[in-house]
Image (cartoon, rainbow, N blue to C red):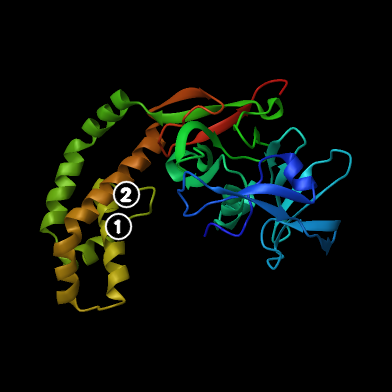
């Protein structure tokens, strides 16, 4: 969903005047978009006059502003998404409420040409990337993890001094992780030999003898993961012959997935990590070991 009815804004001034010029594209990637004049017709809202972000018949996407240079407040379904300030910057708010659906990020992507808001689980979750105006695709020259209080210019994505910060990025140390994998290599090889020779009945018996999650060995972790996969499929067909066929087809894939999960648990316990410090806006490295936003002192 991209909300093609929402009219983009170039500046703070576009919000507060009764009519403004915008661009209408003939095809999404058109290099020669046409200019059109859009009229803002107000609703009678909770805060007095409230204006639609796009077609007026959709009343759940509105904005209102305070007089004398006050910030423009942008709402979606009565949730404030942020504020457009008179210096043409946008300040994010209520970002924790964006986790379960994409509507809010799509509204802002359509509203501001330079915005490419998306979710990248391996790059910090909700991320704001600079978008090229002509190609309409992210160029990644500027990239921020989105948080409450992040404030950027709506045209250039330049960071406002009030939200100046840096990012602590945690990642795996290749030398240390290689040593850890070598430490457990014999146990992984033994577990693989047992799993590849196992049938459904063997796994059922072994799974019934598994200890608590804190006392399992490597083999028991593999059995637990693969038995869980089989149990899910047994709701469709509990016949042993069917489950044995599924096991034979999938055990290599399941073993590799289980190994990845087990290694992640080992890494969390042994902590073979390094920390890298990134300036705000710098391209984020991929990794699922955590990012921390740190405000600069005095910002």
Residue drawn at 41 percent across, 30 percent down: 171
Q: Secondary structure at mark 2?
A: loop
Instruction: From this view, report whether residue 182 is shown above or below residue 53.
Output: above
Q: Is residue 18 left or right of residue 8?
A: right
The reply to whether residue 94 is in sight is: no
Count every numbered label the image shows and give the total: 2
Q: Secondary structure at mark 1?
A: helix
Spatial CA distance of label 2 from label 1 is: 9 Å
Q: Position of residue 48 (x, y in %)?
A: 87, 58
Residue sitting at x 89%, y 39%:
68
Res 181 quadrant in image: top left
Q: Nearer the viewer, residue 256 or 185?
A: 256
* In-image side of 57 versus 173 (left or right): right
Asked if the residues shown at circle 2 and circle 1 are in contact, with their CB atoms under 8 angstroms apart, the answer is yes
**Residue name at image x 32 percent, y 49 percent:** 216
Quick one: 64 or 259, which is closer to the camera?
Answer: 64
Q: Nearer the viewer, residue 239 or 278?
A: 278
Do we see residue 206 in this rendering?
Answer: yes
* Image location (x, y in percent) of residue 15: 75, 47
Where, quadrant-wise, is the C terminus in this rendering? top right
Q: Which residue is mark 1?
A: 224
In the displayed orientation, state which residue is furthest to the top: 297
Label 2 sits on residue: 216
> In this image, 116 relative to 50: left or right?
left
User: 34 or 230: which is nearer to us?
Assistant: 34
Horizontal side of 133 relative to 225 (left or right) equals: right
Q: Residues within 10 Å of mark 1 (few under 14, many from 20)?
A: some
Q: Is residue 94 above or below residue 286?
A: below
Q: Position of residue 115 (x, y in %)?
A: 56, 42
């Amino acid at each position: 969903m991209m909300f093609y009815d929402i009219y983009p804004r170039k500046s703070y001034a576009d919000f507060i005047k009764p009519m403004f010029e915008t661009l209408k594209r003939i095809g999404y990637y058109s290099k020669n978009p046409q200019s059109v004049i859009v009229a803002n017709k107000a609703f009678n809202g909770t805060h007095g006059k409230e204006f639609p972000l796009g077609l007026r018949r959709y009343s759940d996407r509105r904005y209102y502003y305070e007089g004398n240079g006050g910030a423009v407040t942008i709402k979606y379904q009565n949730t404030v998404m942020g504020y457009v300030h008179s210096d043409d910057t946008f300040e994010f708010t209520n970002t924790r409420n964006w986790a379960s659906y994409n509507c809010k990020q799509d509204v802002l992507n359509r509203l501001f040409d330079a915005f490419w808001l998306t979710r990248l689980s391996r790059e910090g979750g909700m991320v704001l990337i600079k978008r090229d105006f002509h190609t309409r695709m992210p160029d990644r020259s500027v990239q921020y993890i989105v948080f409450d209080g992040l404030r950027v210019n709506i045209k250039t994505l330049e960071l406002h001094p009030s939200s100046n910060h840096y990012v602590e990025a945690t990642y795996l140390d290749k030398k240390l992780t290689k040593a850890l994998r070598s430490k457990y290599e014999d146990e992984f090889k033994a577990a693989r030999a047992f799993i590849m020779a196992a049938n459904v009945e063997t796994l059922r018996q072994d799974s019934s003898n598994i200890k608590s999650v804190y006392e399992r060995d490597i083999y028991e972790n593999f059995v637990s993961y693969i038995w869980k996969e089989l149990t899910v499929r047994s709701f469709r067909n509990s016949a042993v012959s069917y489950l044995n066929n599924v096991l034979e087809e999938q055990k290599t894939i399941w073993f590799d997935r289980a190994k990845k999960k087990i290694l992640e648990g080992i890494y969390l316990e042994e902590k073979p990590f390094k920390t890298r410090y990134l300036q705000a806006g710098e391209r984020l490295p991929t990794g699922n070991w955590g990012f921390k936003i740190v405000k600069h002192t005095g910002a």
